[in-house]
Amino acid sequence: MGLNLNVRVVLLIRDPRGSMQSRKHRVWCPGRPDCDDPSTVCSDMQLDYEAAIELSQRFPQRFRVVRYEDLSLNPYKMTKEILQFYGLPYHPEVKMFLDTHTKQDVGGVSSTYRDSKSAPFHWTKDLTYDEVKIIQDSCVAAMRSWGYRNATSERELYDNFNPLLPYSVSQTFAASKTLQ
């Protein structure tokens, strides 16, 4: 007898450089390898990618992947798609929330008010190129799989660097192709 659960899952992925930069400011992360070691974090990301391929093939109507950067750059479109995936309406209050919470930074690191266009790329200004290179060198497979481009120089990193490339996991949202 099989168990049939009505479950839908969205896997949210983020550029490991952005994740590592963000985690530096959390008291619960430093000193914990599963949180602050780039090799461990990126190995997990690669395993997530491999699992995502399998899950999207086995459960194409119940599993989706969203990159944090795609959601941040296209919050209205992506929110509509996520709600649709869950069978929920795009209520006017959702739009109002996005209108008030995605245009400016207000509050501290845990605030829900963020300039969503700049938030995912804050790491390009906050991390040194040496820190970025350490993360990239630990994340070759995961960054390739999830569509994140390496910064090849300090100048490139600090000059409006666009880290997004196309990626492919069956059944991902169309926004994963936004910045080709």
Image (spheres, rainbow, N blue to C red):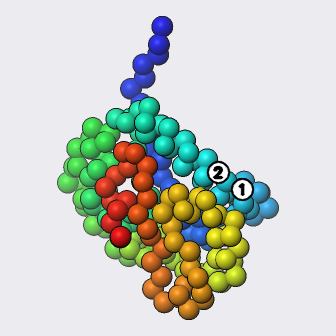
Q: Nearer the viewer, residue 144 or 132?
A: 144
In the image, is residue 7 above or below residue 32? above
Q: Quadrant of the C terminus?
A: bottom left
On the rendered structure, is 120 left or right of 62?
right
Q: Neighbour class for label 1 at 10 Å: few (<14), some, many (≥20)?
A: some
**Where on the picture, by quarter, is residue 175?**
bottom left
Report the residue marked by disc 1: 40
Q: Which residue shows up at 27% across the image and 38% down it?
A: 87
Rounded to the nearest whole Å, what is the CA distance between mark 1 and mark 2? Answer: 6 Å
The outermost residue toward the top is 1
- Residue 2 percent location from the top left of the image: 47, 13
Q: Which residue shows up at 27% across the image and 61% down it?
A: 76
Q: Secondary structure at mark 2?
A: helix
Q: Amino acid at mark 2?
A: Asp
In the image, is residue 26 above or below residue 66? below
Report the residue marked by disc 2: 44
Q: Amino acid at mark 1?
A: Thr
Q: Nearer the viewer, residue 80 or 133?
A: 133
On the rendered structure, is 102 left or right of 43?
left
Residues tagged 1 and 2 counted as in contact (Cβ below 8 A): yes
Label for residue 53? none
Q: Nearer the viewer, residue 99 or 126?
A: 126
- Residue 108 percent location from the top left of the image: 53, 71
- Residue 63 percent location from the top left of the image: 41, 39
On the rendered structure, is 139 left or right of 158?
right
Residue 42 appears in the figure: yes
Q: Which residue shows up at 59% across the image and 58% down it?
A: 142
Q: Secondary structure at mark 1?
A: helix
- Residue 23 percent location from the top left of the image: 64, 65
**Where on the picture, by quarter, is residue 110?**
bottom right
